[in-house]
Image (cartoon, rainbow, N blue to C red):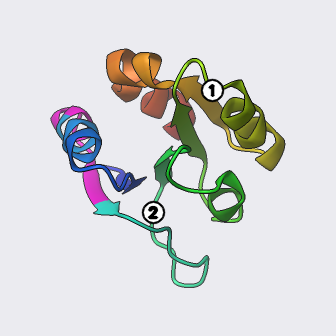
């Protein structure tokens, strides 16, 4: 079982992320803001890039999946420039999150 940090302040989105990853066997913790890298104990980060700056996620010691509204090209580019492992539209996250997580967790 992998430990996943979901930095998703929106209650509806966070419950969806938790349900999808929980059903896939992951232990999910939801936070509105990312913690610092010290004492970080997660295998994967899932983040709403419209609510949290990608640079705050990129410095965490785990691969990260950032999601954004498909029309928000600027947010997509900021996530890519920050070096997140995956930056995907919210619609793809909603369809494929367990598969995307599995790909990054190996």
The verdict on residue 23 being magenta is yes
Where residue 88 appears, x then y in whole percent? 57, 25
Where residue 73 appears, x then y in whole percent? 70, 24
Residue 104: quarter of image: top right
Q: Of helix, strand and loop, which one carries label 2?
A: loop
Residue 101 appears left or right of 81: left
Total number of numbered labels?
Answer: 2
**Spatial separation of the CA atoms under disc 1 and disc 2:** 28 Å
Q: Of helix, strand and loop, which one carries label 1?
A: loop
| Residue placed under numbered mark 1 in the picture | 72
Instruction: Inspect this view and state whether residue 99 appears.
Output: no
Instruction: Inspect this view and state whether residue 17 appears.
Output: yes
| Residue placed under numbered mark 2 in the picture | 42
Query: In the rendered image of this protein, does residue 17 appear above or below residue 69?
Result: below
Magenta-drawn segment = 20-29
Report the residue at 52% width, 27% height from top: 103
Front residue (pair 54, 86): 54
Query: In the rendered image of this protein, does residue 81 appear above or below residue 90?
Result: below
Residue, far right:
81
């Amino acid at each position: 079982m992998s430990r996943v940090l979901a930095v998703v302040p929106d209650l509806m989105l966070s419950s969806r992320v938790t349900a999808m990853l929980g059903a896939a066997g992951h232990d999910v913790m939801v936070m509105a803001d990312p913690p610092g890298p010290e004492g970080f104990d997660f295998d994967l980060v899932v983040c709403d890039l419209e609510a949290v700056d990608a640079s705050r996620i990129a410095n965490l010691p785990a691969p990260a999946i950032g999601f954004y509204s498909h029309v928000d090209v600027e947010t997509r580019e900021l996530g890519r420039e920050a070096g997140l492992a995956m930056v995907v539209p919210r619609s793809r996250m909603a369809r494929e999150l367990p598969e995307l997580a599995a790909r990054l967790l190996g």
